[in-house]
Image (tube, rainbow, N blue to C red):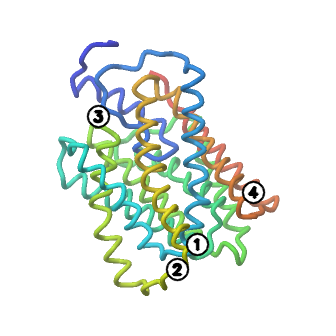
Amino acid sequence: MSGKHVSKRAALPYFHRQLNFRNGFAVRRMTSITSAPSAARPTGAHLIVAVMIAVVWGTNFTVIRWGLDYLPPFLFVALRFAVAALGCFFLPRPKISFRLIAATGVVMLAGQFGFMFLAMHHGMPAGLASVLIQAQAPMTIALAALLHRELPTTAQLGALLLAIAGLVIIALDLDANASVLAFFLMLGAAACWAVGNQMVRAMGAVNAVALIAWMSLVAVPPSLLLSILVEPLPPMPDAHGLAVAFFAVFYNAAIATLGGYGAWAWLLARYKAATVAPFSLLVPVIGATTAALMLGETFDVARVAGMALLVLGVAGSVFGVRRR
């Protein structure tokens, strides 16, 4: 198939296999498919690219924490996607229903990141947030079973139970620095991501970067409206605070969103999803490590055990897929 044009109908099975490997940001698995990836083993340079993407996404949780020191959560979300939406000037809208793009943008972007930023605003540590958001993987498996009757494999079912056990341990170990409210807000973010996965699935094969740019465009109005309605106008920060806020918005929009998704889609156009997807398992590890080093976050034994079980559950959802 390599080098030959593939119809949309022929491309869909490959796109669905990519969905089966979801454990990082959903649209990371999407790319416009005109030829099936044929390379079996990444080159050294491409391995570096894959690791750097995980580093960018993992460290972004610390950057979000910095930005929230100077920006209210919904305004931060609105600014992030307003900058990312500038890609619409350069990328044509994917040839799918705009209503579907709009609904997915509201749920997967405005909803997911609205819940996440609000959770971190209410004390959810950045490192723990990078792990809890991975609960979207077992949620996606559960939704696929309910909506599409795609029953999980035995390995995936075991992974789901591991992830649930990890979430329970983390919930029982919450303290004043990570409230119950923040915990459930993070689960809300993961749920929005999981629901968004099903909406993305209905789109077929699309260009990932163009889709995220147009989804960003529709994520701005609800985020901005919520900011106007419920958030007081933040005081003007000093020069240092302004620089930190600007950097946080730029990093989130240009580097983590457009740059990260674009590079991930570029890799997926060259390699099978099973080769690329496991690199996203580095994201929660890097997220927790970066938060510990740069924010001084600490984790007791119970929380580390819960985080480990959740990450193992996510890994099981990747490697437990039924091979075709």
Q: Locate the N terminus by quadrant.
A: top left
| Mark before the other along the chain sequence, 4 or 3 | 3
Type of the residue with mark 4: Leu
Residue displayed at 47% across by 73% down: 73
Asked if the residue under mark 4 is in contact with the one under mark 2, i.e. CB atoms within 8 Å, the reply is no
**Where is residue 217 drawn, in percent x and y?**
28, 58
Residue 71 visible, this angle: yes
Disc number at residue 205? 3
Residue displayed at 57% across by 25% down: 45
Q: Which residue is mark 1?
A: 240
Type of the residue with mark 1: His
* Badge 3: residue crowd in 10 Å (few <14, some 14–19, many ≥20): many
Q: Which residue is mark 2?
A: 237
Q: What element does badge 2 sit on? A: loop
Mark 3 vs mark 1, foreground winner is: 1
Mark 2 vs mark 4, foreground winner is: 2
Q: Quadrant of residue 318?
A: top right
Type of the residue with mark 3: Ala
182 versus 139 height, above or below: below
Asked if the residue under mark 2 is in contact with the one under mark 1, i.e. CB atoms within 8 Å, the reply is yes
Q: Is residue 264 left or right of residue 91?
A: right
Q: Is residue 115 left or right of residue 44?
A: left
Q: Locate the C terminus by quadrant.
A: top left
